[in-house]
Amino acid sequence: MEKVIQSLQMGQNALLESPTGTGKTLCLLCATLAWWYNEADKLKEEFGDKVLVKSQLPVIIYASRTHSQLAQVIKELKKTEYRPQTTILGSRHQMCINSKLKNLNGNMKNTMCRSLVGRNECSFYDPVKGHALSILGEIELEKRSGVIDIEDIVSEGNDVGVCPYYLAKELQNSASVIFMPYNYIVDMSIRQTLTLNLNGAVIIFDEAHNLESACSEASSFELTTKVLSECLKEIPQASKPGEEDSVGLGALHDVLQQFREWIMDQKLPAEGGITLPATDIYEILERSFGDTDKNLVIELLENL
């Protein structure tokens, strides 16, 4: 705990190791909170203004590999004397309570959620705006604690008819501690979706030996020739002659066609497959794209 506080005071990174069963998870968080509250007391003496003090304090981001691990951390934190205001970020799959999206999974649920919210057709979304703190207050009163987990947020969302997913996002603005899985930090697209600001934050990676695989997963994807073939069939159906997007769709079709042909040309062994360096992908895409086509396709994808 001494090393944790020392690294926080000096604003340095720290790689800390402790044997299994020594309570390192709670030591990490409690040491960080002890430092945080001490900093808050110093600022109160200097400024006195509670709002100003809060704005000067860093947010603590606690990351672990899975939500089940985070749930255990939150459970242990509730046993301590610390009562920081918290939120936990999760996916729509875990937190959406809209019955229209109940049977959808993955990207389809994300897409439909954004569509409903964008058209103001989700009755659970509107109450979140401007009411997050009062809803949090109800949870805190019920739980007698500022420490909340996903079950608390989803339960309250169901009770009062408020979207738990957007509620958790909104509470980022007031939380002192934010819990989330690794990939919410290392995956840039997720950070942007959650409008996650890491500037000046204290970031704790628990069980950090899992971080390498999390980074690898965040930067990897699977793309099959079957998926490419289906995309090539759908692009002409989406294209409408004379519309501006049709030019971008045409460029996208050409790129995907060349990419599919490149994959088909690869000679595979009788068993298993081959692993190629990422530079090969960049080279084939670079050959396929001209500057004009590149800009058109990027603009098209950003508008989806």
Image: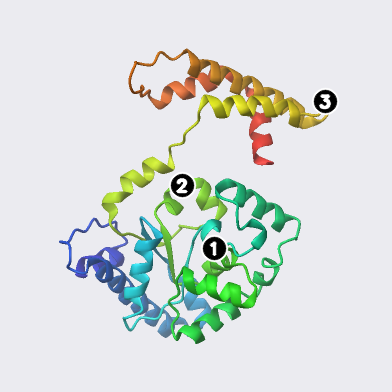
Decide which of tag 3 and tag 1 comes sooner along the chain.
1
Q: Quadrant of the N terminus?
A: bottom left
Q: Amino acid at mark 2?
A: Asp
Residue 241's disc is: 3
Using the numbered discs, state the Cα–Cα distance from disc 3 to disc 2 in whole angstroms.
37 Å
Using the numbered discs, state the Cα–Cα distance from disc 3 to disc 1 in whole angstroms.
41 Å
**Residue 300's x, y, as percent?**
68, 35
Q: Amino acid at mark 1?
A: Met
Please say which color scheme the image uses. rainbow
Residue 116's disc is: none
Badge 3: residue crowd in 10 Å (few <14, some 14–19, many ≥20): few
Q: Nearer the viewer, residue 45 or 193?
A: 193
**Residue 115's x, y, as percent?**
70, 52
Q: Is residue 106 left or right of residue 131?
A: left
Residue designated by label 2: 187
**Residue 24's x, y, as percent?**
22, 66
> Furthest-left residue in view?
19
Nearer to us: label 3 or label 1? 1
